Image (cartoon, rainbow, N blue to C red):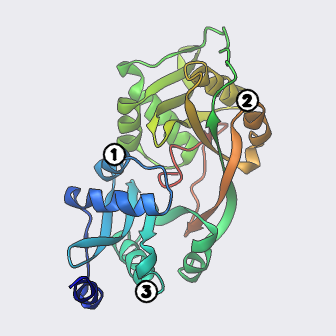
Amino acid sequence: MAFEHDRDFVSAPIELMKLETRHLPGALKLSQEMAWPYRQEDWEFALMVGNGLVVERAGQVIGTAMSWNYGQSYASVGMIIVTGSAQGGGNGARLFDGLLEATHGRNLLLNSTEEGLALYKRRGFTAWGTVLQHQGSLAVAVTRSTRGDIRQATASDLAAIQVFDERATGMPRLPMVAALADVGNALVIERRGRIAGYAVARRFGRGYVVGPCAAESDHDARLLILAQLSKLHNQFVRIDVYAEDGLGDWLASLGLQRSGSATAMVKGQRPVAEGPAHMYALANQSFT
């Protein structure tokens, strides 16, 4: 009977549909199969701030893909997974083409694993940088700066943080930034009455993630990251940074070793930051 059940499952039609809350337990199983550290709560947050597609066979989720819109001109895509038994059958391409159709007209950003590069290049994406994943148990007791211009963010800071984030990314990410600040701990740099940088730390995966972190200089970014890490002693911490900014060796010196990398890619026009504002650490590799 088990053989007949397996045969029926394999012969069942594959359906492409919108990702809904009911699909999240199946999506979680896919990420666990890939050894991605997502929790159910992480999937719930991603769906709350974005949109997704699934491929389903006989009621079972066998693939996912998600997108997050930033205004009318930009979107990021990620969390693209196909279960091992369904790989090689065009399901990844089907999901991704569905994302391209859903985000039609927008410039698209993604961070690709080595396995995904060929698919994305065929769909018109080009590489522009590298994202380094650093993580580990924060055994080193980090001391935050005593500088008075780094402080806890308040609800009244949200609009200014959103404006700074848009300057740093070149994209209007108001709902995303509001959601991240709501679920995480946000710190800001305030100088002469204006927000000159911010960083969020929140629960994610095996522990905590520090990001996004946006600032006007490498020095300020490090101060913000240290301020967040000072609250996370003996916790598992992950930070994703751009290799081009040179923070990798410094993070490793704090005990957060490099554990992987991804290729930053764009289809269309890459957004341009305004002035000295710059994004140093990502909220995660899917959101950019």
Q: Residue at x 27, y 90 (%)?
A: 7
Q: Earlier in the sequence, mark 3 or mark 2?
A: 3
Which residue type does callout 2 highlight? Leu
Which residue type does callout 3 highlight? Gly
Front-most of residues 104 and 46: 46
Q: Which residue is tagged 3? A: 90
Side of 57 relative to 194 (left or right): left
Q: Residue 212, percent across and down?
A: 53, 38
In the image, is residue 200 above or below residue 262?
above
For the residues marked 3 and 2, what is the alpha-carbon distance in whole angstroms? 43 Å
Q: Label 3 near label 1: C-beta < 8 Å?
A: no
Front-most of residues 242 and 136: 136
Q: Quadrant of residue 22?
A: bottom left
Q: Under tag 2, what secondary structure?
A: loop
Circle 1 packing at 10 Å, graded few (<14), some (14-19), many (20+), is: some
Q: Which residue is tagged 2? A: 254
Which residue type does callout 1 highlight? Phe
For the residues marked 1 and 2, what is the alpha-carbon distance in whole angstroms? 29 Å
Circle 2 packing at 10 Å, graded few (<14), some (14-19), many (20+), is: some
Q: Quadrant of residue 239?
A: top right
Q: Under tag 3, what secondary structure?
A: loop
Q: Residue at x 66, y 8 (%)?
A: 146
Residue 45 is tagged as: 1
Q: Residue at x 44, y 81 (%)?
A: 93
The number of numbered badges drawn on the structure is: 3
Q: Earlier in the sequence, mark 1 or mark 2?
A: 1
- Residue sticking out furthest to the front: 1
Residue 277 is tagged as: none
For the residues marked 1 and 3, what is the alpha-carbon distance in whole angstroms? 28 Å
Q: Under tag 1, what secondary structure?
A: helix
